[in-house]
Image: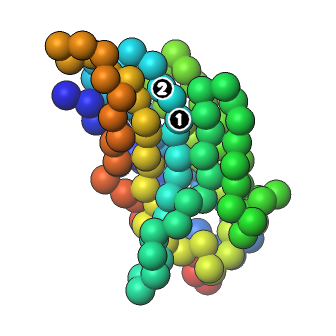
Amino acid sequence: QVQLVESGGGLVQPGGSLRLSCAAFGSIVSINAMDWYRQAPGKQRELVVRITSGGSTNYADSVKGRFAISTDNDKNTVYLQMNSLKAEDTAVYYCHAILSIMTMTISTRSYWGQGTQVTVSS
């Protein structure tokens, strides 16, 4: 069984910083890509940033220059450093991963974390 476990959300003032973590546990052969999505109340879930196994990144325009994704491959963990936070960054942040896993054979599957709340408010 594969799980994505997120941590690091919370309440922060505008202009502040937070770092989110997402660790993947289970029979993981390789990580193809890991993403951070977010969903604000009344809005659709949107992609914040993706990082591929090759290290390529794709950021949403709204977070470019403020957010940074990084990985620790030894720990199967992805981080999202969020700086200069704004009220409009308030949302539930979800980790998503495309993993090659070992079951009877090697298969590629998509997994979601449970979500972590980020609230930016004074």
**SS for callout 1:** strand
Q: Residue furthest right?
A: 65
Q: Which mark is residue 31?
A: 2
Per the image, the residue denoted by label 1 is: 33
**Residue 112 horizontal/vertical position (percent):** 34, 48
Looking at the rendered structure, the secondary structure element under dot 2 is strand
Please, is residue 63 above or below residue 97 in the view? below
Residue placed at 53% from the left, 35% from the top? 33
Of residues 121 and 28, the one drawn nearer to the viewer in this rendering: 28
Residue 43 horizontal/vertical position (percent): 46, 81
Badge 2 density bin: few <14, some 14–19, many ≥20, Cα 10 Å: some
In-image side of 89 versus 112 (left or right): right
Name the amino acid type tagged 1: Ala
Residue 60 versus residue 112 in the image, above or below: below
Residue 84 position within the rendered picture, expressed as x and y whole percent measured from the top left: 75, 66
Residue 26 in sight in this render: yes
Residue 52 is tagged as none
Please report contact status of discs 1 and 2: CB closer than 8 Å, yes or no. Answer: yes
Residue most toward the bottom? 42
Q: Residues within 10 Å of mark 1 (few under 14, many from 20)?
A: some
Q: Quadrant of the N terminus?
A: top left
Query: Residue 5, can we see it?
Result: no
Quarter of the C terminus within the rendering = bottom right
Residue type of the residue flagged with mark 2: Ile
**Quarter where residue 120 is shown:** bottom right
Q: Residue at x 26, y 30 (%)?
A: 2
Residue at left offset 67%, top offset 25%: 54
Q: Is residue 66 left or right of residue 91?
A: right
* Residue 74: image location, x then y, percent: 52, 16
Residue nearer the viewer, 59 or 105? 105
